[in-house]
Amino acid sequence: MSKIVLVLATHNRGKKREFELLFKELSIEIKGLSEFQRIPEFEEEGSTFEKIVINKAKFVSRILDVPVLADDSGLVVEALNGAPGILSARYAGKSATDYQNNHKLIEEMRGKENRNAIFVCSIAISKPTGQVLTYTGSCSGIILHEPAGTNGFGYDPFFYYSPLGKTFAQLSVEEKSRVSHRGQAIRKLKDDFKKVLIWFEDR
Ligand code: ITT
């Protein structure tokens, strides 16, 4: 059976690093978007991570005419009724930086006793025909008042993972991937790998 080549449809360097590590053991070769023509801006549409990621993967796969893997992920905070949720990347505005998003999160969480949050990650693999496979993973944590750690990206410095007694930004990329929402989603794909291979061969 030939090796699967997947284009990873993300502009987020933090995500890309994690995917490269997670796919190392699988017979899947990951290519970056930079190896292809520039694709038009994708407007995220949908009310859930899963719906958005399906649209994202299909959109890019159709344009590039190759199989594509996309990720839609974010932080769901209980005391904020699920915000920032699907708006995690642009919580503080359209081109917001991680710093600005974290600043807004901490302002909104001021005085809140319930600090429970969940990171969610949905990944979708789409073939140019529009056929899609999806996998979702999640990971529970606590939103800290002060940041800790310099690894990772996004909300990692404020996301405290109790079983390890550290924030995600205090973990190496390997340690984070073992427990994270993205790691969980990829592990589901790995458990399903035989089906994925057959799905790929089937045109
Ligand atoms: P692409 O759409 O190009 O993949 P993006 O950053 O815009 O990149 P999303 O729309 O999926 O991706 O938004 C995800 C945001 O959620 C991301 O920018 C972070 O703010 C946050 N996030 C997701 N996974 C995270 C993680 O593992 N650690 C910290 N923050 C994370």
Image (cartoon, rainbow, N blue to C red):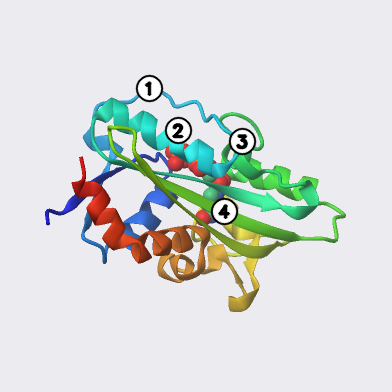
Q: Which residue is mark 3?
A: 47
- How crowded pointer 2 is (Cα within 10 Å; few <14, some 14-19, many 20+) is rated as many
Residue 133, placed above or below residue 137: above
Q: Which mark is residue 55?
A: 2
Residue under the point 34% across and 33% down: 130
Q: Which of the image's four quarters has the N terminus?
A: bottom left
Label 1 and label 2: CA atoms lie apart by 14 Å
Dot 1 or dot 4, earlier in sequence? 1
Dot 2 or dot 3, earlier in sequence? 3
Dot 2 or dot 4, earlier in sequence? 2
Say whether marks 1 and 2 touch (CB < 8 Å).
Answer: no
Q: Which mark is residue 120?
A: 4
Amino acid beneath label 1: Pro
Q: Residue 43: x percent and y percent?
A: 50, 26
Q: Residue 21: x percent and y percent?
A: 33, 62
Amino acid beneath label 4: Val
Label 2 and label 4: CA atoms lie apart by 17 Å
Say whether marks 2 and 4 touch (CB < 8 Å).
Answer: no
Residue under the point 23% across and 53% down: 198
- How crowded pointer 4 is (Cα within 10 Å; few <14, some 14-19, many 20+) is rated as many
Dot 1 or dot 2, earlier in sequence? 1
Q: Secondary structure at mark 1?
A: loop
- How crowded pointer 1 is (Cα within 10 Å; few <14, some 14-19, many 20+) is rated as few
Q: Which mark is residue 40?
A: 1
Q: Secondary structure at mark 3?
A: loop
Label 4 and label 3: CA atoms lie apart by 14 Å
